[in-house]
Every structure is written in C-alpha cells, then in structure tokens.
Image: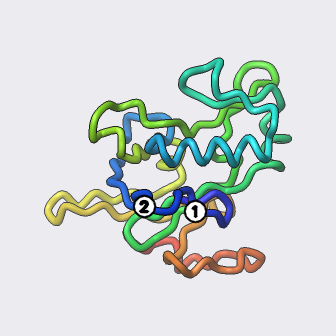
Amino acid sequence: MLYGNEELHKAGEQMKFPAIVDTGSSNLAVPDAAFDILKEKWKRDVPELDCVIDDNFCQVMTPCDEVAKKVKPVALQLSGEVFELQPELYLHQAEGKRCQFAIHSNQLKGSSGNLFLIGDTMLRHLYQVYDFENETISLGVNTHSEGKMRMYDAGRKPDFTVPLMSGNLNESV
C-alpha cells in the first residue's frame, strides 16, 4: 500500500496481505498496521483530522474538495498491478462540511484482520471479470474513472503528466 510515493509499512513488518474483493462492502478496509501509518500521514497533511469521534471513519470538518487538495493518492498493489485512487475517490462528503475518509481499519477479528477488503470505494471505478472456472478476477479501470483511478505495473509508475493510454485499461491482475 502506498500513500503518494510512500510505502505504508515499517521495517521488518509484513508487507503482503491477502485481499478480498467484496461487492457487498461500501468502503476499503485495510489491516491495522497499514491503517495506523496511513492515519499518521493523513494527520501530517490535515492536522485537524479526527479519527476518534466516529469509530469507523476518520473525518474532518472541512469540505472534501478542500481536503482533496491536501492529501495524496492511495495505491494498492494487487498481484503485479498497482491501483492508485486519487483523493476524491476515497473522500466522502457527509452532512454539512464533514468530510469522511472511506478507508478504514479492518474490523474483523483474528487472522481475518490482516485482510484488505476491497469494496465499492474502489470497485465502482473498475471493470471486473470473474472467471469462476479458472478462479481468477481480472480488473481494469472504467473509462468514466480515467484520471481518478490509475492502473500501472508494479515498480513502473508512469509519468502522469502524459494522458493515460486506453491500452493500459484492460490488463488483468
């Protein structure tokens, strides 16, 4: 997992976790260790961030369009592909000026707590092909999400000042 260009793990910590594509979940849940580091990064960029009042979400009493200018993209690597979400994809404008972050700590107990649960926050921006016979899931960025979600080969982050090529959108993971 990345925040901007920073990896979200500490030296010696586990870097690989299983992931579940969960079409019934609204948000993106990450293992506690990754979430704790992510909160530190968010608080550095948005000092007034509150991750205590609401048990499920970090939030700030500032409109999301203003918060999006302060925080960085979040990226997940699935197999050999990186999926990068721009801030407007993981920020949710709640009532009034409250901006909620739609990435939270995985609340499952035991070994299931070390899972990434990939829900609608990310899935609504992806084409998904479920191949039950071969037990694979293929993902590609929806055309309506170009520029908001980016997909690239791990270790090969492209220069995003150049427009995305449509050929990159149909690769599977």
Would residue 45 be seen by someone viewing this image from the given angle?
A: yes
The reply, left or right, for residue 63 in relation to residue 169 is: right
Residue 126 rendering spot, x and y as whole percentages: 49, 56
Question: Residue at 59% across / 29% down in the picture?
Answer: 57
Report the residue that reaches farthest toward the front: 12
Of 166 and 24, which appears nearest the observer?
24
The reply, left or right, for residue 35 in relation to residue 107 is: right
The residue indicated by pointer 1 is 7
The residue under label 2 is which amino acid type? Met
Question: Residue at 59% across / 37% down in the picture?
Answer: 102
Of 12 and 96, which appears nearest the observer?
12
- Mark 1, Cα crowd under 10 Å, few <14 / some 14-19 / many 20+, is some
Location of residue 155 with respect to 30 vertically, above or below: below
The residue indicated by pointer 2 is 15
Report the residue that reaches farthest toward the left: 133
Question: Residue at 54% across / 68% down in the picture?
Answer: 151
